[in-house]
Image (cartoon, rainbow, N blue to C red):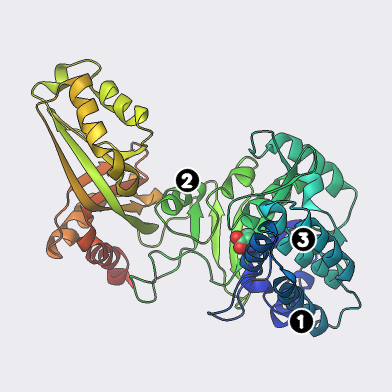
Amino acid sequence: MKKVVKFGGSSLASAEQFMKVGEIVRSDSARRYVVPSAPGKRYTSDTKVTDMLYACYALAEADKDFSKQLKAIKARYNEIIEGLKLDMTLDEEFKVVEKNFKEKAGKDYAASRGEFLNGKIMAVYLGYTFIDAAEVIRFDEEGNFDSETTNALLGAKLNQVDSAVVPGFYGAYADGKVKTFSRGGSDITGSIVARAAKVDVYENWTDVSGFLVADPRIIDNPAGIETITYRELRELSYMGASVLHEDAIFPVRREGIPINIKNTNAPEDAGTWIVESTCQKSKYTITGIAGKKGFCSVNIEKAKMNGEIGFGRKVLQVFEDNGISFEHMPSGIDTMTVFVHQDEFMDKEQQVVSGIHRLSEPDSIDIESDLALIAVVGRGMKSTRGTAGRIFSALAHANVNVKMIDQGSSELNIIIGVANSDFETAIKAIYDIFVTVSL
Ligand code: ASP
């Protein structure tokens, strides 16, 4: 059995947190590959080292003195090294960082040092081999992650060692210039290492015990999700559920490696399993609820639209020409509605309206703003009758007007459009009808 274990920033924010991590890694000999984030927040008002690095580098780039800021970053690492009583220093590494900052090595390089330096400490602490991600995680010339080159390079390197620490969040172009993933990208590194090392499980350790059925800012103490499929997760993270970076599932998905989200502060909790497929049913029929505010709907009406070939294409052409992506497109016989992000659409709305008139000659166009979309996701919906009925009767009882309904052909999710102001009420109503009643 082989496992990759990725630890998030809050799991590595201090020496005390490092000790918990040490215990977790040492308690299971399968945990042979470790992917650390940079030290995160120790308390709510604290600053993540990644943010400190960005701020420090901004000064360097503007030719201002950054010595105080760099010293504060070094102090964060020294506090960890001293707290762990390790016989090491990062003096040499910091000299290189300072020199490269002065030579303007780039924002990505700067941010990546958070993980790089934490990885150095982790390798000494665990007695594992340090592998610099810049040597094994590759981006192509366009800045896209090059999965195949990476898999070959990293696979070969991992084959030579028994256990390794690979810092998260960054890689490099072929010429060695460092590039980071987007924020939270250490999750992606964990997945990349899991694929290359052909492990059995990718454990992703964070500060919560897995995914919750709904957002805890809306629902008090929501139930947890035991098992979720990659596809369900994709739907939920797209709609705003954030625990794992949304791109983190792609590398492991190719190999069918399960991800287990675990809590560093409560390692005994089972956490959430993210799997390709499972015969385990969701406890509550639905797996999760997530949503986002801030959408607009563009409602287009034309008599006999149903008989006009190419009408939809022409409408979508206008959105494409204006660089606006659409979210959903429910349609009726003589109507068609396009849901877009309000902030993306606002500046261009009049161009879009006139563009649609010119290209597809509708009878009328009506725009509605301040809408929210809610996704009710669940693999169990396919085989359970009455799910939609329960959702809509709950919404009716809660006095929520449903403006749009869209059920994907996969029967994995039902998307509901409501007014922004009804968003929280709607989520509560749906949560209660599926979860609260069965508790
Ligand atoms: N340290 C990086 C960030 O704060 C990446 C990560 O933690 O995954 O976004």
Q: Earlier in the sequence, mark 1 or mark 3?
A: 1
Task: Measuring from the top left, give residue 434's x and y in whole percent.
Answer: 29, 63
Front residue of this view, candidates 27 and 355: 355
Which residue is labeled 3 in the image?
116
Give residue 145's quadrant in the image: top right
Lateral position of residue 146 relative to residue 422, left or right: right
Q: Amino acid at mark 1?
A: Glu
Residue 264 seen by the camera: yes
Circle nearer the N terminus (2, 3):
3
Describe residue 130's horizontal placement relative to residue 398 as left or right. Answer: right
Q: Residue at x 60, y 74 (%)?
A: 47
Residue 257, image x, y percentages: 64, 48
User: Which element type, helix, strand or loop, lies under badge 2?
Assistant: helix
Quadrant where the image shows the C terminus: bottom left
For the residue labelled by badge 1, is the local secondary structure a helix, a strand or a loop? helix
Q: CA distance from mark 2 to mark 3?
A: 32 Å
Q: Say whether disc 1 or disc 2 marks the residue closer to the N-terminus.
A: 1
Examine the rendered structure and indicate whether residue 436 appears above or below residue 169.
below
> Of 179 and 415, which appears nearest the observer?
179
Q: Which amino acid type is marked by label 2?
A: Arg
Q: Which residue is mark 2?
A: 231
Nearer to us: label 2 or label 3: 3
**Which mark is drawn over residue 252?**
none
Residue 1 visible somewhere in the drawing = no
Please give the residue where the numbered disc 1 appears in the rendered image: 79
Q: Quadrant of residue 130?
A: bottom right
For residue 87, above or below residue 214: below
**Amino acid type for the residue under numbered disc 3:** Phe
Crowdedness near tag 2: few (<14), some (14–19) or many (≥20) residues, C-alpha within 10 Å: some
